[in-house]
Amino acid sequence: VDFFAVKDDDALALFNAIFGRTLQILQKNMETYARSCYDAIGVFLCIHITAKFRDVMHRRNVPALDRYFEKVDSVLWPQFEHIMELNIGSVRDCDPQKLGSIDIMPHYITRRYAEFSAAIVGVNEANPNDRVNRILASLQGEVENFILRLAAEFPGRKEQLIFLINNYDMMLAVLSERTTDAKETESFQQLLTARTQEFVEEILAPGFGGMMGFVKDADVRLERKKELQADERHVAQLVRGFASDWKKGIEAIDQEVMRSFSNFKNGTAILQNALMQLIQYYHRFTKLFSHPPLKAMAVRSELINIHHIMVEVKRHKTTF
């Protein structure tokens, strides 16, 4: 009965006299467990559970467990940071050449990272902590470097880009599904957009590289207020080559995209991006014929109407 009759400092002293040894045993058990635990998500959940219980005690005006919660935090936080540093170091020291064969599909290590990071971010969103954000930023940086090292194992730039896009897209999908407004999501979206644009240029080059190069060079000269310099025979080859091969080129791009990307939705977006870029290049190419000396070339009459190309592009919208 005395336990419920005392107040303030007397109540705290009586509580410690009764439960002090019990709390010490609990703390020792926590320390023993934490030293041998390498479950970062489990430890982080314990940190948040401790914070929740502390809030409950404060709302009920019960400060008796504050010191115990502080000691639990002093055990859990260092262990959590230690486990995360081990993970960061593991990614940093990973040698791609020791991982066996690598294909263009999402790598299992990046998938594990995405699921692990999403779990930590999901828990942290309930009660954001800058320490966790810094740790996650460090881990993300090492994972990004690791993906680049993996991509470097492919001999061709196109294969490197396909690998990067598949991995960025997979990580972005996992993080977007399980978190809201995560910094990692914005970062991977920027990387995905940049690599996708580079891939579009790469995939257009085999079938349309001559026209693309001609357009880029001509645009630079026009921007500098210089006259266009073009050999009529070369221009005629570009016009007639495009006229004879543009449908086959679009079909080849369609088939390669279908083979390359694990996410059909992302593949659709990339295909449409590539075909729209092709239309823009061709539109710029035809506009050049309004400038001398192309304006006077007879091959101008052999240009394909851009609307025919747009109709063909629409036909490929339902690929995925």
Image (cartoon, rainbow, N blue to C red):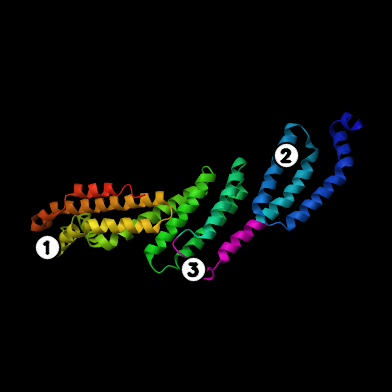
Residue at the spot of label 2: 53
Left or right of 193 in this view: 288: left
Helix, strand or loop at mark 1:
helix
- Residue plotted at (36% across, 56% down): 258
Helix, strand or loop at mark 2:
helix
Residues under labels 2 and 3: Cα distance?
48 Å
| Amino acid at dot 2 | Phe
Percent x, y for residue 114?
A: 54, 53
Is mark 1 in CB contact (under 8 Å) with mark 2? no
Residue at the spot of label 3: 101
- Residue plotted at (70% across, 47% down): 46
- Residue plotted at (20% across, 58% down): 218
- Residue plotted at (48% across, 53% down): 170
Q: Residues within 10 Å of mark 2 (few under 14, many from 20)?
A: some
Q: Nearer the viewer, residue 209 or 219?
A: 209
Residues under labels 1 and 3: Cα distance?
49 Å
Q: Is residue 198 visible?
A: no
- How many discs mark residues in the rendered view? 3
